[in-house]
Amino acid sequence: MKAAITRRGMLLAGAAALAMPGAALAGPSRPNIIILYADDLGYGDLSCYGSKTIHTPNIDRLAAGGTRFLNGHSPSATCTPSRYALLTGDYAWRASGVQILPGDAPALIRPGKFTLPTMLRSAGYTTGLVGKWHLGLGDGKVDWNGNIAPSPLDIGFDYGFYMPATLDRVPTVLIENRRVVNLDPADPIEVNYHDKIGDEPTGFDHPEMLKFGADPEHSNTIVNGISRIGYMTGGKKARWKDEELSDVLLGKAVEFMRARKDKPFFLYYAVNEPHVPRAPHPRFVGKSGMGPRGDSILQLDWTVGELMRQLETLGIADNTLVVFSSDNGPILFDGYQDKAVELAGKHRPAGPFTSGKYSIYEGGTRVPMISWWPGHVRAGKVSAAVVDHVDLLASLAKLVGGTFPRDAAVDSFDMLAPLLGQTDRGRDHVVEDTKLMVTTGTKVAGSGARIFAIRAGDWKLIRASVEPHEFHGNPIGTLPVHQLYNVANDPAEKVNLAGKEPQRTARMAAWLDKIERDGRSRP
């Protein structure tokens, strides 16, 4: 362990130096940057990660032309906390109120907070968001019929075309910058997550209207034949059609790139797939043989291929860095009866790992991650470096010569070298967490306490925590005693070695306690 601590000290010292402002890449070599963020995509959901049951040729080509990470991690096992950490460089558990949000939650990232788009804009980039937001809007009561603020435009984005929350939550509308798209003033939107409003049908009362059934949490207002979480009335012309949504978002992403192709841009493209409810475009229906979830993954793969084709058409492919990953691990059943479990067959969405979304096991945060930039990212490399999405802020700052204050991005380390495929030496540790508190007005799942783990080399400690052992059928991985696993020898985390390794267990628990107590992990 002494050697491991020495390596840790060396890495932290290096990270402290590298995180300081660097020299920007000159002229045309400074790349456009696209973060392509999937939703609930698992480590085993892609053929380039070993899946034999589903074929993803476009993402496979991305991996073949770039660096594919075996140890890529999302900051959390749930969506909102991972997105918060990616955009701020801070672990979400350091801030209050960061959980899986309802669709009318106030903005989590407040104006004035230093963010990834803030840093890139100060470095000369035009910044854009397309897709899923789910980080809250407004100050507590969103005016869906007027100007929406605070919004992504108040934390560093120059442009936004986005969903307020998730596919399964109201309001089912798109926002461009500060206004709901296609809103009819004569049909104002109202949203409520506690009480039923209006006279629109719900999944509870009219299950015969549904494309597929849903659990009680997802059985409120029906939109496009799918019942959602929460109640909504009005805004009928503004509501999206699920089967067309991915095409609409892709069109906006391409439009953003085309308009800004002559100057550096940053695009945070947060796609929907394969999050529930899964209602892919008809051209993908039935193609996977695994039902709507598998078809949604094929739709995602097609989207990636179309985006890459557009980069070639615009003549900017060679000067664009693409980072592809997922916000957390996979889940089959997540509220809708779309036969994802029944039709999965031999498919293992988390690959060799246990569980998935919501879980502190590796299946919850070990996610596919690929970096691609022709001539700069090493092509065809399979990297063992441990990297985390929270590191993107510091890593991209080093790339473009951006700066950030010492009290910002407190958990973000410069991982530019592994991101470019130059080394297999990444983080010496990564903190994983989950928080099973979902406030919807109809259901609260879990106590709200954080569940923590720390990875260091091949070892992983799950801190003792008394929480539910399953959620939506997923084992969460918590016990009232510490758990210690060697994930190299035991990737499924089946053999708890805490009793055989008491000193290592104690040291790792103390290390995790210190990271939490210190309020930062970056020196």
Image: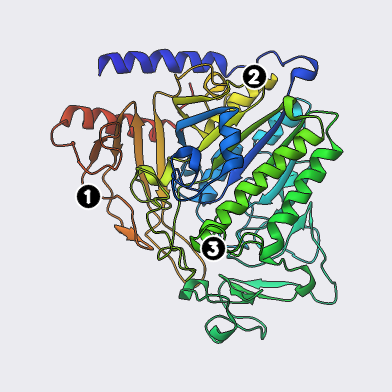
x and y, in percent, of residue 512 in the image: 34, 33
Residue drawn at 72 percent across, 16 percent down: 24
Sequence-first disc among 1 and 2: 2
Give residue 311's quadrant in the image: top right
Q: Is residue 380 above or below residue 78?
A: above
Spatial CA distance of label 3 from label 2 is 37 Å
Sequence-first disc among 1 and 3: 3
In screen coordinates, is 237 left or right of 420?
Answer: right
Q: Nearer the viewer, residue 297 or 416?
A: 297
Q: Is residue 173 above or below residue 313?
A: below
Q: Is residue 468 above or below residue 398?
A: below
- In the picture of the structure, the residue carrying the numbered disc 3 is 292
Quarter containing the N terminus? top left
Estimate how packed mark 1 is, as few (under 14), some (14 to 19) or many (20 or more) residues with alpha carbons within 10 Å. Answer: few
The answer to whether one can see residue 149 in this image is: no
Q: Is residue 67 above or below residue 11?
A: below
- The dot on residue 376 is 2
- The dot on residue 480 is 1
Query: Disc 1 or disc 3, which is closer to the eye?
Result: 3
x and y, in percent, of residue 36 in the image: 63, 41
Residue type at mark 3? Pro
Spatial CA distance of label 1 from label 2 is 47 Å
